[in-house]
């Protein structure tokens, strides 16, 4: 049975309980992060901490712990749960004020709720989907306007994944005003004539930690990058496509809305970026 962390305590998962008045439960009033674990070490931890602080700040929430405390909790959970490959999920909500109210509670009297748990995923690097590529569909992006904040408001992304599953596909790319914003839980890319194209950062997409790392490694490898919106038609006419996330790293996309991308099999850019990502990330893992 997993050991989890809840508000200062390490507990068996079946003993960890949160109030029914917690605002994360009632109003999705919270943020989260998922840090990958490879070889028992945390990947890009500093990046996830920086984004956590930004998300909390954008929602006027207080960061309940310091960097050293966050790191210690992550390491303790990885160690006690013997995670070699997988991730650590972290969630901070505005807490449980004791009743339901749209007005934010006073943080001086209502402390944040802090939850962390591990997910062990053996064989994460050798994913079958990374070898075969995934198929995606396009769906309308009807989420709220602040996708740059990593909140726990994940109902529509979950629905998008279910739409993809119903269509016999693996994931969905979200489209707004004719342009792809991102995947349901990942950033989206296409490759045309050797150039990597991905949407530029704004409030419209999540500022992916893996995205930032992959683009940095791509530039260091002298790959051409263009940050701009692209359409589904452009994607279907691309030579390659792929996604990035903390749990799927770099994964090729081989079909969009029934149209094969390139040859319908993973090309050369995404697999190479995946290889570089693992090589470089392991050097800085902690």
Image: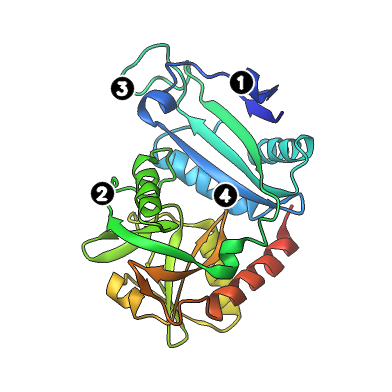
List x then y, in percent, for residue 119.
Answer: 64, 41
List x then y, in percent, for residue 8.
Answer: 65, 23
Query: Which mark is on residue 48?
Result: 4
**Mark toward the start of the polypeptide (2 vs 4):** 4
Number of the front mark, 1 or 4: 1
Contact check, label 2 and label 4, Cβ < 8 Å: no
State the SS at label 2. loop
**Mark toward the start of the polypeptide (1 vs 3):** 1
List x then y, in percent, for residue 89.
Answer: 59, 40
The answer to whether any part of residue 213 appears in the image is: no
In this view, the residue in front, 117 or 138, is 138
Asked if residue 141 is positioned above or below residue 177 in the image, the reply reads above
State the SS at label 4. helix
**Mark toward the start of the polypeptide (3 vs 4):** 4
Q: Left or right: 76 with respect to 144?
A: right
Query: Which mark is on residue 142?
Result: 2
State the SS at label 3. loop
3D distance between C-alphas at marks 1 and 3: 27 Å
- Report the quarter where the N terminus lies: top right
3D distance between C-alphas at marks 3 and 4: 28 Å
Contact check, label 1 and label 4, Cβ < 8 Å: no
Residue 66 sits in quarter: top right
3D distance between C-alphas at marks 2 and 4: 26 Å
Name the residue that disc number 1 marks.
Answer: 16
Name the residue that disc number 3 marks.
Answer: 103
Contact check, label 2 and label 1, Cβ < 8 Å: no
**Mark toward the start of the polypeptide (1 vs 4):** 1
Residue furthest bottom in the image: 193
């Amino acid at each position: 049975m997993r050991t989890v962390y809840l508000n200062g305590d390490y507990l068996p998962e079946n003993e960890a309980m949160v109030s029914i008045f917690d605002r994360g439960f009632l109003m999705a009033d919270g943020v989260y992060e998922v840090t990958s674990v490879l070889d028992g070490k945390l990947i890009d931890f500093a990046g996830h901490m920086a984004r956590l602080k930004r998300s909390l700040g954008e929602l006027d929430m207080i960061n309940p712990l310091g960097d050293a405390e966050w790191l210690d909790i992550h390491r303790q959970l990885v160690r006690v749960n013997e995670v070699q490959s997988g991730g650590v999920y972290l969630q901070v909500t505005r807490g449980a004020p004791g009743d339901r109210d749209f007005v934010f509670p006073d943080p001086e009297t209502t402390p944040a709720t802090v939850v962390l748990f591990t997910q062990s995923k053996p064989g994460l690097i050798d994913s079958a989907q990374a070898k075969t590529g995934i198929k995606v569909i396009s769906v309308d992006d009807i989420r709220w306007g602040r996708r740059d904040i990593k909140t726990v408001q994940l109902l529509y992304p979950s629905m998008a994944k279910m739409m993809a599953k119903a269509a016999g596909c693996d994931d969905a790319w979200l489209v707004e005003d004719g342009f792809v914003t991102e995947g349901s839980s990942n950033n989206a890319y296409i490759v045309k004539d050797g150039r990597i194209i991905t949407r530029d950062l704004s409030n419209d997409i999540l500022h992916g930690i893996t995205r930032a790392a992959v683009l940095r490694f791509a530039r260091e490898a002298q790959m051409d990058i263009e940050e701009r919106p692209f359409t589904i038609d452009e994607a279907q006419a691309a030579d390659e496509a792929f996604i990035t996330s903390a749990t799927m790293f770099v994964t090729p996309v081989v079909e969009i809305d029934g149209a094969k991308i390139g040859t319908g099999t993973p090309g050369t850019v995404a697999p190479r970026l995946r290889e570089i990502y693992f090589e470089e990330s392991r050097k800085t893992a902690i």
